[in-house]
Image: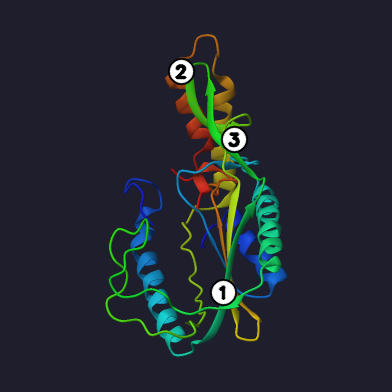
């Protein structure tokens, strides 16, 4: 999983405890963490640590067993869109290998930090200057968006 | 790696996507040549971190913590060991959006 948010901490936590590479998967259209939309990198670390510790606890409690292939070509399993397998699958232990590669995330050029700080202060001031009694919802939403936006 | 083409930084995506696909292909080729017999097990449990995200307020539904809403705390685990029960890998499934930091920095 590649993410600047909590999945990275989940991965590292599980790997430290179970002592094996870990992969963290998430599903779309799901809820949010207890700490969400905070703007705080520490929140991602805290949520990731909590999830990772629960994952490691479950993983360590498991006893694995030798596994053999059971699916036959053309067999349809429940929930699958189409039959599984192109040809006969041999019986025998599952063979497995783990490999990983690192790919650096591209980073946008945001320019000098001083200029960004000044722009952020200007946009925040625009929000504070709004008259809540007379400003339209659109003005408030726009100012709020610009205050939060980065590098537009 | 989708998203609206008009979003800031989207011009960086095609080259990044190509790098990721190339890395996946290289990893798969490397793994193919180093397979070993494995043991597996799977289970599920619960993790209490997740919270419903649809909050009704002033007649609108917004994305925010709805502490009383329904939620699914299920966590699924697959563990893969070598034949001597030494861990090879762990796969963790947990359904919560990675938006602890901010909605503008999801992954």
Q: Residue at x 69, y 63 (%)?
A: A56
Letter of the chain that mark 3 sits on in the rendering: A
Letter of the chain that mark 1 sits on in the rendering: B
Mark 1 residue crowding within 10 angstroms, few (<14) / some (14–19) / many (20+): many
Earlier sequence position, callout 2 versus callout 3? 3
Q: Nearer the viewer, residue A95 or B34?
A: A95
Letter of the chain that mark 2 sits on in the rendering: A
Q: Which residue is mark 3?
A: A121
Give the image location of residue A63, x and y in percent: 66, 72
The mark total stands at 3
Mark 3 residue crowding within 10 angstroms, few (<14) / some (14–19) / many (20+): few
Q: Are marks 2 and 3 on the same chain?
A: yes
Label 2 to label 1, Cα distance in Å? 56 Å
Nearer the observer: mark 2 or 1; the answer is 1
Q: Nearer the viewer, residue B69 or A110?
A: B69
Q: Which residue is mark 2?
A: A137
On residue B40, which mark appears? Answer: 1
Mark 2 residue crowding within 10 angstroms, few (<14) / some (14–19) / many (20+): few
Q: Residue at x 38, y 85 (%)?
A: A90
Q: Secondary structure at mark 2?
A: helix
Q: Residue at x 45, y 27 (%)?
A: A142
Q: Are marks 2 and 1 on the same chain?
A: no
Give the image location of residue A7, x and y in percent: 58, 57
């Amino acid at each position: 999983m590649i993410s600047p948010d909590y999945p990275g901490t989940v991965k590292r936590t599980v790997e430290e405890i179970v002592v094996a590479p870990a992969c963290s998967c998430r599903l779309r259209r799901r809820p949010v963490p207890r700490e969400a939309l905070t703007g705080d990198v520490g929140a991602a670390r805290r949520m990731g640590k909590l999830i990772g510790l629960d994952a490691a606890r479950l993983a360590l409690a498991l006893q694995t067993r030798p596994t053999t292939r059971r699916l036959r070509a053309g067999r349809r399993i429940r929930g699958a869109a189409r039959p599984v397998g192109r040809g006969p699958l041999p019986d025998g232990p599952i063979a497995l290998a783990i490999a990983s590669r690192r790919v650096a995330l591209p980073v946008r050029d945001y320019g000098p930090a001083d200029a960004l700080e000044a722009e952020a202060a200007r946009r925040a001031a625009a929000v504070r200057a709004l008259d809540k009694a007379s400003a339209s919802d659109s003005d408030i939403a726009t100012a709020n968006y610009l205050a939060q936006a980065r590098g537009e | 790696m989708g998203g609206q083409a008009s979003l800031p930084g989207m011009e960086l995506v095609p080259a990044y996507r190509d790098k990721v696909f190339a890395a996946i292909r290289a990893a798969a080729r490397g793994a193919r040549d180093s397979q070993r017999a494995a043991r597996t097990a799977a289970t599920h449990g619960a993790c209490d971190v997740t919270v419903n995200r649809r909050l009704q307020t002033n007649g609108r539904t917004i994305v925010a913590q709805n502490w009383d809403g329904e939620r699914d705390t299920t966590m699924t685990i697959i563990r893969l060991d070598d034949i001597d029960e030494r861990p090879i890998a762990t796969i963790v499934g947990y359904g919560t959006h990675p938006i602890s930091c901010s909605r503008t920095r999801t992954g």
